[in-house]
Amino acid sequence: MAQRCIFCGKELGFFNRDDTLCGGVTQPTCSECYKTLRDLGQKERGERALATGRAVDPEEIAANIQREEQKEQAAQERQEKARQVLRTGQTCLRCGGPMEKYGTKLFHLGDEGLMGPVARDGLFASWLEADVIRCAQCGRAEFYLPEPPKIPSEPAEEQVTCPVCGTEHSSLSGCPTCALNWARGRRPAETRREKEKKPPWEG
Ligand SMILES: [Zn+2]
Ligand SMILES: [Zn+2]
Ligand SMILES: [Zn+2]
């Protein structure tokens, strides 16, 4: 009696036979059924073969599928464990996905540091190591920087010379000397004018 394709039941001749390994066991299949199976994995093929009720050595197929599933589960658990180590407990600000540790990145701090122009006065190291975390869902990354070094307290103010009295003062405020003189009623310009107004006999 001629063998039949376990999937479609068609009788298998010399030219339309294409045996297929399903779940680790070779099954007699026709060329058409082979084409529908060839892109599938062994597990899926085995399940389909078992579903026909006509599979060759179904116990072997079932055992192979079970072994395959255990392997998949173990791999999944390993992956899950690996993920747990990466967990940060933070969620992505963009998509809400879990933020995972990604490693560290070295930033070079030259004259233009992360905090703006930085004088090379020893307050900043040349390299800064920052922790990077990354969203497992969308890839958005965040940096965590170590405690910042003491930033030079005040930005250097530009000093200007008062054109009236010659006092050096900050460009951010008016001349303090002139302000004081005004308050005391001694306006430099008036002082000079008063001198000029003096009658000659008083000179
Ligand atoms: Zn077939
Ligand atoms: Zn995200
Ligand atoms: Zn002044």
Image (tube, grey):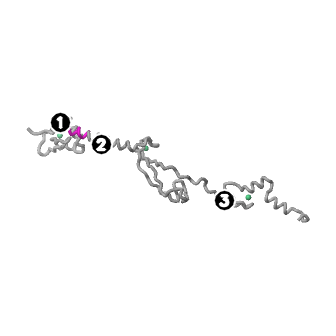
- Cα–Cα span, label 1 and label 3: 92 Å
**Percent x, y for residue 195?**
84, 62
Position of residue 101 in the picture relative to residue 70 (left or right):
right
- Of residues 178 and 13, the one nearer the viewer is 178
Q: Which mark is residue 75?
A: 2
Residue placed at 47% from the left, 54% from the top? 128
Q: Nearer the viewer, mark 1 or mark 3?
A: 3
Q: Does 70 sit left or right of 171 as displayed?
A: left
Which residue position holds label 3?
Answer: 159
Report the residue that reaches farthest toward the front.
122
Residue at label 1? 59
Query: In front: 58, or 131?
Result: 131
Q: Which residue sits at x=52%, y=51%?
A: 148
Asked if one can make out residue 34 in the rendered structure from this viewpoint, the answer is: yes
Viewer-nearest of discs 1 and 2 = 2
Q: Quadrant of ligand 1?
A: top left
Residue at the image position 44 percent from the left and 48 percent from the top: 141
- The total of numbered circles placed on residues is 3
Residue furthest to the right in view is 201
